[in-house]
Amino acid sequence: MNWKKYAAGLPWLAALAASSLAQTALTIEGVADKTVYKDRVTFRVPAWDGYDYDVRLNGKAVPTDVGWLVNTVDYHELSVRRTTLTTGAQTNLLIRFIVRASARGNTEWGLPPWTPYPWVSSATNEFAGARLRVVAPAEYPADLVAPLAVFVETATGDPVRVNGWLTTPGQASIPVRRGVGSGSLKAAARDEQVRYEPRLASLTASTTIRWRTNEAWTLASGTLPGSLVWSANSRIAVVKNIIIPKGVTLTIEPGVVVKLGPQVNIQLAGNLEIRGTPSQPVVLAPANPAQAWGGIITTSAAPARITAQWVFMTGSGGVSDWFKNTTYSVHRTEQALLLLDGTQATLDDCFLLDGLGQVGHGHNSTLRLNRCLAQRFITGGEYVGCTFQMDRSAFLEFPRDDDAFDDGDNDGLYFTEGTYTLQNSLVGWAKDDCVDAGSGGAGSVTVSNCWFEAAYHEGLAWSGGGRSTTTRQSVVINCGQGIECGWSTGANSPLCLVDGCPSLGNLVGARFGDNYDWSYNGFLRVTNSFLLANYRDIWGLAWDNWTDHWSKMDIQGNFLGLNDAHHTNNSTWQPAADGGRLAAFFSMATNGPVGLGFAVRQSQFPLHQWTNPIPVGLSHFSTRKVSAHYLAETPQAVLAEGPVEFQPGETIKILKLPDGAAGQSVIRFSLSNPAEGELSGISRIYFIQPATSGLKLSWTRFADEQLVYWNDADGQLEQASGVLGPWVDASANHSPVVLEPGNGSRFYRLRKTP
């Protein structure tokens, strides 16, 4: 029988037949498979009579026939199973899609937005047995600001990975991250010798600077006619480019200070020898701190050579588009402090600080860095076809340590073809990756006993054609993705071996794949490692075909935070029994408390932010359980309280205040009663209702403290013993300020700072 022709003669039967035919298609409205959506997407699963539906978004049931908003930035799976009630026949449909954050561009497909957590100061115990080493010039012009480098080490010079603030009376505090930091010392008002006594937790040091006024400067510029020595403690003002021809050597002896004019370069075809000493380092600095000098430039026309010991190089990178009209392959155009082209360079105990451009660019060169520090540049630089060796060194802050996202290739280090070795070193606080090995031809990277921390994207990003990487006994922590075997331009690359590495507290511990719809042909092998406390410990999803690439991963013999059905030859982490295994990755004592505090940058927030997640952090992962008590309260009542606990391997816990705080003017979160931890960081934070207009100084009292507060960043609190003054700045110029009892009557006022 011709069913359609027969049904057409009976209108009601024709309508029924048409309806039955239409229902055979299982449809989902609003989302499509393998699609990326910006910020949000709404889907709807229409239900038809005669069917039973099971609709699940990421494994959780959702209803049919309603618009369902998805605004969680992540990778999502929407699965629908429809069962015909009369026959039991089933139809299945899987929709894979991504909601990405528009503010992050295309950098984080399938991942929540990641912002590294601020560090927490270390406990007193973590400094036990360590020494504080401070490097500064012995004599310095009084009209310049003296650079300062800070290291926390063992007696044998090994780094101690502690956090804290270096304080020196009368000077700005200097943050020390994982045992390394840098800053400056303000000059004395006259020609005099000043002794400084910096302190970091329980550690002390001393350094003495003779500030010199009316220094006699020797002008320098142009092409050197022959080899030249700038003698010890001389003062050199470079007003135009210095050119060192082939066969000529410029030697700079201990204690020399070189000030360079805006965008002035040292152009090198010959040899540069800088011979500073621990007590008399050499300094290369801008003549005007507001106008950067250029850099040290070599070219392939002649094989130049650089050897430098105990030298500060500050304030370089004066040309923002220096690479724009060159043939060099770069991700950033800013000028490099060290432009190495066919160059042999060895830097020992050198401190490269506060550049407006890149630390370096290497092309077919050899660069060896021993006990060096590079800090606060746009990027650590790009190295192409180089032999690069780094030992006991640190590359930090590219370009700065804050919460601002900046998708601009701000890598700690970027390697392409060549041979690269990193050992006993620290790389971190980068807006992109700590270390990226990507474009270009074949190359190898070997990493051992290093520490990588606080990258917005990858701690270690291994990609490209012909790439081979080996990473051993190295910590990757607080990064977007810890260790990544990413995109490739050729077959069987990159080949990534990871052995004996903790990858902790990241969005992803170890991943095959990347955040782009490119090609993925490499292989990732992870053994004897600790993939713990990550949002995803292991991830194999890549966007070439939106499938998990399990066959391209060998993950075995590791400890995982959760059992993984795809990688069964691993052990599930048992914190109480296994925590001691992390002791191998401590540079300090493991038998005492670690630092504990709120992982935030300030102690006061607008009241409406009390609904945000509140992170509590440790200074270092522990081998034992660490705990404290948290309390959320107003001056009138307790809103919430309870324990916050860290198992071995965890460094961040998130608190969230329950509903019920609406209508308050001040909410305080506090930490107390630590066990196996010490309250070394911020232990009290405040959420305060902002003033509706103008400067407003307010006062409140909790059971154990009274404080004054305001909500204008330009407000400066002043105090006096009488209403007529004299008025002086309060000890803290940030809100709130705790009022100390027993100091007699005090009057306070708030003024607007210019």
Image (cartoon, grey):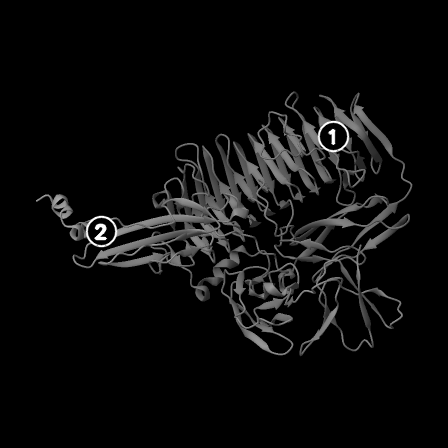
Q: Is residue 143 above or below residue 464?
A: below
Q: Position of residue 68 (x, y in %)?
A: 40, 57
Q: For label 2, count other residues whose C-alpha is less than 10 Å away and answer few (under 14), some (14-19) or many (20+).
A: few
Foreground residue among 33 and 423: 33
The amino acid type of the residue labelled 2 equals Ser
Residue pointed to by mark 1:
265
**Amino acid type, mark 1:** Asn
Q: Residue at x 57, y 62 (%)?
A: 617
Residue in view at x 73 percent, y 70 percent: 698
Whether residue 473 appears in this view of the structure is no
Measure the alpha-carbon separation of dots 2 and 1: 79 Å
Q: Is residue 280 above or below residue 298?
A: below
| Disc 1, SS | loop
Quadrant (top left, top right, bottom left, bottom right) of the C terminus: bottom right
Q: Is residue 263 left or right of residue 428?
A: right
| Residue 19: assigned label | 2
Disc 2, SS: helix
Q: Could you say which is closer to the camera, residue 716 or residue 157?
A: 716
**Residue 271 percent location from the top left of the image:** 71, 27
The residue nearer to you, when weighing 739 against 549, is 739
